[in-house]
Image: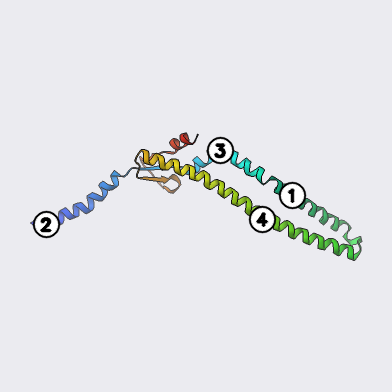
């Protein structure tokens, strides 16, 4: 009899206690993507990045236009040109294309790197606000709503975060 009570109490503890512990957890969700899209300074930052890379973008456009003009010239007058003039123009065109390609690749890498840096700064601000709200209201778990398949009666703190960002 005593042995049965012991086994039953062990079973009850292993079944009921985890549910009680889970029930005690305060779980909330937040929509990080929506907050990022509605981040007030995001458009400002995008404009700053655009102006930061404007000179390089314009230079690349000029180079591309120059290359296209040379290609058209070569297509139009190439058959009537002297062989050495044509070869010289073709070699020049090849070099220009190579320089353009290298500059375009470098431009893309720098632009992507800067955009990533700025995105990470914004996400860090959002993360800190979410963390402060979680600490303030003693939430145990905060999940991004994009990772939640279904939630019933789970609080969404997206609006609270948006209010603090503004």
Give the alpha-carbon distance from disc 2 to disc 1, as whole Å: 84 Å
The residue wearing badge 2 is: 4
Q: Secondary structure at mark 3?
A: loop
Q: Position of residue 74 (x, y in %)?
A: 85, 58
Q: Tell which circle, 4 or 3, labels the residue nearer the N-terminal end.
A: 3
Mark 1 neighbour class, 10 Å CA radius: few under 14, some 14 to 19, many 20 or more: some
Q: Position of residue 43 (x, y in %)?
A: 59, 39
In this view, 73 is above or below 49: below
Disc number lying in front (3 or 2): 3
Give the alpha-carbon distance from disc 4 to disc 3, as whole Å: 27 Å
The residue wearing badge 1 is: 59
Q: Tell which circle, 3 or 1, labels the residue nearer the N-terminal end.
A: 3
Disc number lying in front (4 or 2): 4
Quarter residue 41 falls in:
top right
Q: Secondary structure at mark 1?
A: helix
Mark 3 neighbour class, 10 Å CA radius: few under 14, some 14 to 19, many 20 or more: few
The residue wearing badge 3 is: 41
Q: Tell which circle, 3 or 2, labels the residue nearer the N-terminal end.
A: 2
Give the camera-side residue of 116 and 152. 116
Q: Tell which circle, 4 or 2, labels the residue nearer the N-terminal end.
A: 2
Mark 2 neighbour class, 10 Å CA radius: few under 14, some 14 to 19, many 20 or more: few
Give the alpha-carbon distance from disc 4 to disc 2, as whole Å: 74 Å
The residue wearing badge 4 is: 106
Give the alpha-carbon distance from disc 3 to disc 2, as whole Å: 65 Å
Q: Position of residue 104 (x, y in %)?
A: 69, 54
Give the alpha-carbon distance from disc 3 to disc 1, as whole Å: 28 Å
Residue 131 shown left or right of residue 35 in the figure: left
Give the camera-side residue of 44 and 154. 44
């Amino acid at each position: 009899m005593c042995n049965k009570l012991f086994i039953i109490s062990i079973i009850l503890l292993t079944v009921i206690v985890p549910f009680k512990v889970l029930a005690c957890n305060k779980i909330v969700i937040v929509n990080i993507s929506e907050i990022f899209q509605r981040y007030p300074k995001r458009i400002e930052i995008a404009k700053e990045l655009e102006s930061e890379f404007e000179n390089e973008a314009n230079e690349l456009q000029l180079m591309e236009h120059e290359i296209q003009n040379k290609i058209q010239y070569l297509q139009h007058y190439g058959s009537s040109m002297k062989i050495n003039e044509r070869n010289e123009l073709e070699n020049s065109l090849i070099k220009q294309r190579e320089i353009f390609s290298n500059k375009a690749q470098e431009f893309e890498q720098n632009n992507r790197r800067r955009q990533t840096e700025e995105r990470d700064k914004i996400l860090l601000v959002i993360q800190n606000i979410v963390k402060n709200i979680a600490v303030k209201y003693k939430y145990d778990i905060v999940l991004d709503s994009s990772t939640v398949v279904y939630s019933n009666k789970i609080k969404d703190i997206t609006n609270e975060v948006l209010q603090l960002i503004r």
